Amino acid sequence: MKKIKYILVFFLLFFLSIIAYSQEVFPLANAQWTERFTYGEYPNSTSTFFRYVLQGDTVIDNIKRSKVYYIPDINKRDSLLVGYFYVKDKVVYYRQDVNDKPSGSSGHLDICDAYFGKDYPLYDFSLNEGDTASVYCGDVKLIVTLVDTLILEGIKQKRIFFNGYNNGLSYWLEGMGSTMGLFDHVEKIPTCSCYSRQFVCFCHNDTVLYLHPAFSECPQADFSSINEIKQDMVNISYNPTEHTISITSPYLINQVKIVNSSGVLLQKEQINGKYQTIVRAEHLPETGVCVAQIIFQDGRTVSKKIISK
């Protein structure tokens, strides 16, 4: 019996050590990257601060992954589920959510077509001097010129410099990512100079660990944008004469499903990011109760009853 206990304790400690090791290579929870998006040419340009945050996890293809949310404007509460991280053998893998098809001009990344919906190595922290990294959809090859270490949260982390990467001034850092921006090196090369993005700061466990020298402060960490949606925050009304359902929400709506009292799907409508929408509901029964399931772009859902008389 004692032998079995020792074996169980060994496997538990081994499992916990793997989790701790992965967290050292790259954060998998309670992390946020803030960047500035600028559109237009000076002096008529406009700027907003956006943010990527990690919160919650899921399992895809039998692999546990951290959820990555995108907040287009840190002054608003909208958040979109855009993808997933996991770490294996010092390589950080990212998979873009299949419902996320943004463009670079909107502030969010314009990801390489070959990467969409697939696992791909976002960062490879096993690289050493002389090794090569393929970036910008394979259009650019960077050679590692220097590898040293930097203390981050009391842990000595690997830092990798490349030739030609922002004139050799920027780098990849274990436990954080790139000082050029979280996804900078996996985007398509911009076809115009009408917009730009700049990395501002990185926070972990509500502590600022990196602040770009061009900025004097980092916006305060706030994960409240991905709190559970309350029922009374979403309004829905049914017009039986016109067979329409009107929905308004403070969050971007991605999809609306209508099911009957037995749970059978009657209708599904793709909304693709609107705060207000009208759904034609021609399949509702003349009398009875149905449920409208409202799915938001960050993956959260709210269910509302529809009563036909």
Image (tube, rainbow, N blue to C red):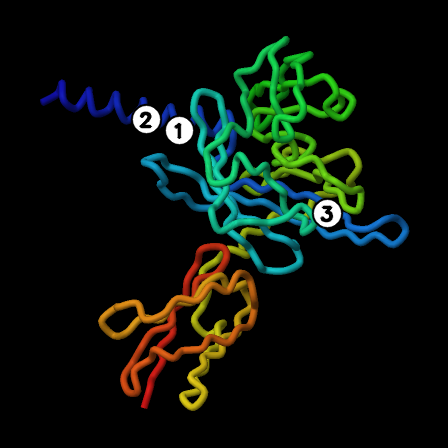
Q: Residue at x 49, y 55 (%)?
A: 298
Res 15 label: 2
Q: Position of residue 25 (x, y in %)?
A: 51, 25
Res 19 label: 1
Foreground residue, 300 or 18?
A: 300
Amino acid on which the number 1 mark rests in the picture: Ile
Marked residue nearer the N-terminal end (3 or 2): 2
Eye-nearest disc, 3 or 2: 3
The CA distance from mark 3 to mark 2 is 40 Å
278 relative to 19, above or below: below
128 relative to 165, above or below: above
The CA distance from mark 1 to mark 3 is 33 Å
Marked residue nearer the N-terminal end (1 or 3): 1
Which residue bears the numbered disc 3?
37
Eye-nearest disc, 1 or 3: 3
Query: Would residue 61 appear left or right of 241 to someone viewing this image?
Result: left
